[in-house]
Image (cartoon, coloured by chain):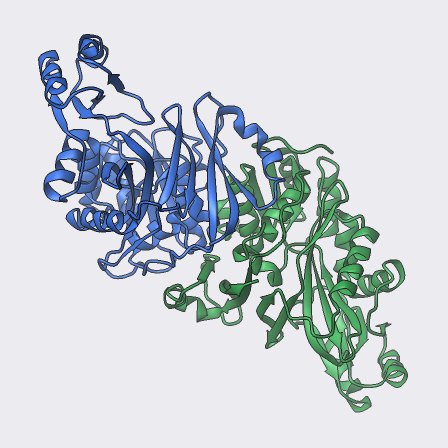
Chain colours: A blue, B green
Amino acid sequence: MTELNKGATIGIFGGGQLGRMLVQAAHKLGFKTHVYDPFDDTPAGRIADNQTIAPFEAEAAVEIFANCCDVLTYEFENIPIKAIDHASQFTNVYPDKKALQTSHDRLVEKTFLRDKADTPVVNFAAIETMNSLSEFVHEFGAPAILKTRRFGYDGKGQVKVNSPRDVKAGFARLGGTDLIAESFAPFVREFSIIASRGIDGSIACYPLTENVHKDHRLHTSIAPADDPQNVSDEAHAITNKILKALDYIGVMGIEFFELEGGELIVNEIAPRVHNSGHWTQDGGCTDQFEQHIRAITGMKLGEITLKHVVKMTNLIGDEILHVGTLSQKPNTFVHDYDKRDINPGRKMGHVNEVISKV
Amino acid sequence: MTELNKGATIGIFGGGQLGRMLVQAAHKLGFKTHVYDPFDDTPAGRIADNQTIAPFEAEAAVEIFANCCDVLTYEFENIPIKAIDHASQFTNVYPDKKALQTSHDRLVEKTFLRDKADTPVVNFAAIETMNSLSEFVHEFGAPAILKTRRFGYDGKGQVKVNSPRDVKAGFARLGGTDLIAESFAPFVREFSIIASRGIDGSIACYPLTENVHKDHRLHTSIAPADDPQNVSDEAHAITNKILKALDYIGVMGIEFFELEGGELIVNEIAPRVHNSGHWTQDGGCTDQFEQHIRAITGMKLGEITLKHVVKMTNLIGDEILHVGTLSQKPNTFVHDYDKRDINPGRKMGHVNEVISKV
């Protein structure tokens, strides 16, 4: 595929904040945008040039949408594969189905990482019965994490099994859906890499971002992260393997656990722009949203050398009401997603604080 | 006025690129946007939450628009005063009518600057007859510039009178409209200050921006400008006087001529975000568009300390077709206005090149 023409239309499945920031980046580059979401009045749909409001299962709507767009992408990984399959008949979809299928299901994802991308992951096994969970804990020890294979996010759909005695209650809580058990990784730190790969196969990965979670939700990200155990090169090597194994096009977020001694484990991959990459908007480099638009439209990838140390803090629930005060702090830049309803736990915006020069 | 609530709607008269970048900044801060323009499919209207397509003279449309918005502003100064007057009955308009009236007419503007803001300007006089132009050239010498008092931009509506012999031809060319004659300022440099003033009266002005024109149109801006003649303090003092004399709210662009010896002359003021302030988008500070939105919504003004030296270059006409190549240059950030038609001389986008740390 050659580079899309100026004024081409980028279609985005999903109308949330990630879609919104993709729309903003696309506009900056002079592209038109079309957002597809089941709900009206979404953060992204509201500011897009065009929107389709229809269920992802509505094939006729997906077909019309795909035919209106020069390239399609998505802002979250729980889009039904069928919608992507159907849309792909009419226009290019990046990242493609393979990336989506891999990240849809934790078992498929972990298996891919271990067997196809030659990547370190925790011990894991499919869990179909209480017995298989017992066996897993017996074999790999406690604590283990029991998770639904699909639709989990921000700590939802998971339960910690601290000892063999928790097996029954844990299985009872999540049983009835497809499950996976994973060994608990005794990490000293969580970090991520925001990676990008263009249609021409070129790769550009931002430096390590250190992430701190609170209540199972990303709270802050700092980049570039200190690297006392010198793991950056290995993390970037792993990242490259994952991108190539998927023949990936677009921006991807890859979450790592760093263990004592510097051993790395890949926790999960997200085939999309990623919350831990929001700092890029104020890092003095191409931001991850523009980078994704560049990648999927066939443009060359942009500059990723950041000029500042930036700390991103999510604004959850009614923290968004403090935007006025926060935005008065020097070197602090607020990003408000303009969500209609403030719910506890909902990501409403974020703040990037430029801490120092790199 | 207190700070507007999250999710409030900002109305913008004018759908061009300045309006577009105001819309983008408003969205970043979580505001909604409504663009009013006589034409459909405008750069700003296309990405606003809402748009009104009607002549500025349509009072009923202006009234409905004003009633839909929590605050109004404008992106260019040739909005009919009547529209602003009418809209002001229903909601606040910033900058107010006084600023607009002053900049509408070069004679009013120069008179205000000299008499009310105590600001150095060139010699000038209203020209109603060929005779009065002769007298002006006789009194103040050649060259003089004969200009239409209204609707001039980018060098349009002006003619240079190089000697008394040019008087006849010059007057013949522009006569029939209200005219002003100005002495030619033998400047060694043109620069501008992008200034902002909040509803609370606080003032924040970016550092000097050096401007280079080509074919009467802004070609490049560099900030912060070198200041070999040490004129920055005086320029900022003049800027403060102008903002206060107008009781101004919002962002204003003030263009200066710097003469040999360090004397300053104010060339013109623009009661809006300004082309020579586009570098702020990649300077590591609050950009002028966000600053304007902050000012008119009652937020505190944002950080204006820039972290990089940035050079902005306008992309005129089909230069926009090189966006792909330009965006591959390191430290170069492109902004495309997504204008439908490429016309020679039309501002289609701009490029900010981050040159070095400050």
Q: Is residue A218 left or right of residue B27?
A: left
Residue A49 shows in this picture = no
**Residue A132 or residue B45, whichever sits in front:** A132
Residue B199 shows in this picture = yes
- The image shows residue A324 at horizontal and vertical percentages of 61, 34
- The image shows residue A140 at horizontal and vertical percentages of 13, 23
Q: Residue furthest front?
A: A261
Quadrant for residue B71, please give it. top right
Q: Quadrant of the N terminus of chain A?
A: bottom left
Residue at 31 percent of width and 58 percent of height: A4
**Residue B41 or residue B141, whichever sits in front:** B141
Residue at 39 percent of width and 45 percent of height: A225
Residue at 86 percent of width and 64 percent of height: B114
- The image shows residue A271 at horizontal and vertical percentages of 26, 41
Question: Number of marks in the image?
Answer: 0
Q: Is residue B254 left or right of residue B51?
A: right
Q: Is residue A297 left or right of residue A281?
A: left
